[in-house]
Image: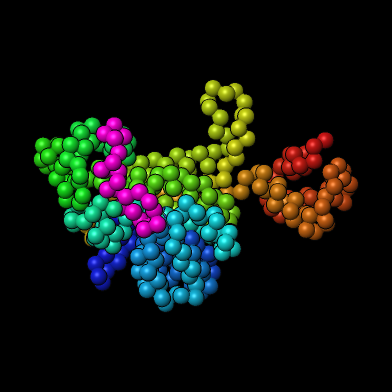
Amino acid sequence: MGVIMSSQTHIPVLSKEVIEYLAVQPGGRYIDCTLGGGGHAAAILEHSSPGGQLLGIDADPDAIETARKRLAPYRDSVLLIDDNFVNLRDICLRYDFFPVHGILFDLGLSTFQLESKRGFSFQHDSLLDMRFSPNQKTTAGEIVNTYPEAELARIIKTYGEEIFAQKIARHIVQSRPVRTTLELAEVIERALGGRKGRIHPATRTFQALRIVVNRELDNLESALKQSVDLLGFGGRLIVISYHSLEDRIVKRFMQKESKDCICPPEVPECRCGHRASLKIVTKKIITPSPEEVEYNPRSRSARLRAAERVISPNEQYEKAFEQLNCSIGVVPSGSWRRPALVEKLRKTFTSLQINNFTDAVMGRFKM
Ligand SMILES: C[S@@+](CC[C@H](N)C(=O)[O-])C[C@H]1O[C@@H](n2cnc3c(N)ncnc32)[C@H](O)[C@@H]1O
């Protein structure tokens, strides 16, 4: 959960850091992939004014409506889309909203969702639903009441990192039908012999079910890949995650995308041709200050990672040749030997701060 909300308050997590790491600037274009109550979005709009624009996405239509009210003062600068961020690229193409200066993911649940009667929390009794969007098919209730024991155990172990997954799955299957959040929490508590420590024994199982219902990890992986192509050069990608499974995906993604070669170490020469598209900005993860955690205890597990879109050598060359093609028409292969053209190439490359002029030209025009 990324925000603390009551009927009046609505405090986004790591808000100052989001603005800082997104490097929000007046007139900038930003995408908030997890709009929620619109807390981060409002801060981004405030700091990107005048002229800033924001595309806000949420799979939960209730969140879109809440954010619409919150962002009413900026209505001319926002576009709110009720959709899953797994469709990020299509959404941006449809609305011609790219390249952008920054993309934000504040993963997980909003407090509105936690406090709703939609099955996300065992603090309230409600049916086991857990879908972000009513358009999704599978509910937590279907998983709990129809999946085979072995599959349930696998889900709880993998997505809840629960060491007692087998035991919990067995008790769930024996207690079917399990209809509500409180019933499920009781079954799990009984399976584990009551409450021990600070964390409720059902916490990990609830996390696992929610992840599977909403395909959270697959969608995150896919959306991260899509976001690279939507960022302008120098644009920032910010992700706030709330558990280690999410954070691991973000960390690995940023590490991979910041490398020029991803061949296994035993391969003597690079064969992958992979080129860095990101530079990691947060060498160490950013976590909330003790003051923020005290003020907003739900922020305690938040971890922020940021990366900046960099131009790879291939993209630099493409950009240079694009500029050349604009100024002198398509450059015919082999014609690079003409002195006037070489001079133009050299100037364009210098203006783009590309040092290795010969490599670029040779790479483009195979000799
Ligand atoms: C932690 S809340 C965001 C809170 C928001 N940053 C704010 O300041 O109010 C996460 C939001 O992301 C949404 N969400 C999670 N996964 C999503 C997905 N795959 N596609 C679209 N929205 C998603 C949830 O519905 C929820 O509203």
**Rendering coords of residue 238 (x, y %):** 44, 53
For the point 22% across and 45% down, the residue is 203
Q: Please identify the quarter of the rendering in which residue 116 is found.
A: bottom left
Residue furthest out toward the bottom: 73
Percent x, y for residue 244?
A: 33, 42
Image coordinates for residue 94, horizontal then vertical, percent: 57, 61
Q: How is the image coloured?
A: rainbow
Establish if 334 lies above or below 119: above
User: Is residue 325 found left or right of 210 in the rendered image?
Assistant: right
Residue 182 lies in magenta, yes or no? no
Would residue 88 be seen by someone viewing this image from the given angle?
A: yes
Q: Which residue occupies 54% across, 22% down?
A: 266
Q: Say if 270 sits above or below 103 in the image.
A: above
Residue 205 occupies which quadrant of the picture?
A: top left
Q: Residue at x 42, y 51 (%)?
A: 239
- Name the foreground residue: 278 vs 107: 107
Q: Quadrant of ligand 1?
A: bottom left
Query: Which span is picked out in magenta?
Result: 130-151
Q: Residue at x 48, y 60 (%)?
A: 31
Q: Residue 37, located in which quarter of the rendered image?
A: bottom left
